[in-house]
Image (cartoon, rainbow, N blue to C red):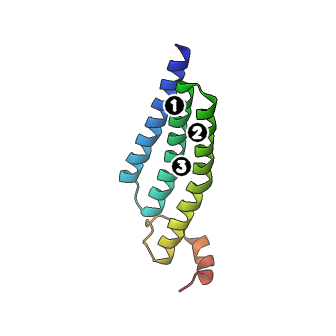
Amino acid sequence: MIKEIISALLILLGAIFMLISSIGMIRLPDFYIRNSASTKAVVLGVSLILLGVGIHYDDILIFIEIFAIIFFIYLISPLAAHIVSRAAVITKVEFWKKTNLDDLDRRKEELPD
């Protein structure tokens, strides 16, 4: 009984983080902030959902697979978000008007034309 409650709470919490991420994708002002919100909240949401599934099934092989999946998500997701954001900067996707671009201006000489 306790196992099912913990599993359900983790899956529900993960779904809430995914919902927050999807709301952020709609409501946030520019591409870069949306990219950040989707990366962080989705990674946490997927991790919580997978942990809930692992607790529900209570099998060591499933836990090993889940931890491998979570490891690769944590490894690849920030890298993918960085690559997509860098490509957006290079292709001159507009920033939100309130974004502080001082650091970017210092690095612009290093970007390819």
Observer-nearest of 8 and 89: 8
Q: Reply above or below: 79 against 25.
A: below
Tell me the mark number nearer the camera, choosing from 3 and 2: 2
Q: Earlier in the sequence, mark 1 or mark 2?
A: 1
Disc 3 residue type (three-letter)? Lys
Q: Position of residue 38 (x, y in %)?
A: 47, 52
Tell me the mark number nearer the camera, choosing from 3 and 1: 1
Q: Secondary structure at mark 2?
A: helix
> How many numbered badges does the structure rendering display?
3
Q: Kindly identify the residue that appears in the image at 50 percent across and 35 percent down.
A: 49
Query: Hey, which residue is sitting farthest bottom in the picture?
Result: 113
Q: Secondary structure at mark 1?
A: helix
Disc 1 residue type (three-letter)? Val
Q: Earlier in the sequence, mark 3 or mark 2?
A: 3
The answer to whether marks 3 and 2 mark residues whose Cβ atoms lie closer than 8 Å is: no
Disc 2 residue type (three-letter)? Ile
Bin the neighbour count of mark 1 within 10 Å (Cα to Cα): few under 14, some 14-19, many 20 and up.
some
Q: Position of residue 100 (x, y in %)?
A: 54, 66
Q: Which residue is mark 2?
A: 66
Observer-nearest of 103 and 64: 64
Bin the neighbour count of mark 2 within 10 Å (Cα to Cα): few under 14, some 14-19, many 20 and up.
some
Q: Reply above or below: 16 against 92.
A: above
Q: Which residue is mark 1?
A: 53
Alpha carbon separation for disc pair 1 and 2: 9 Å
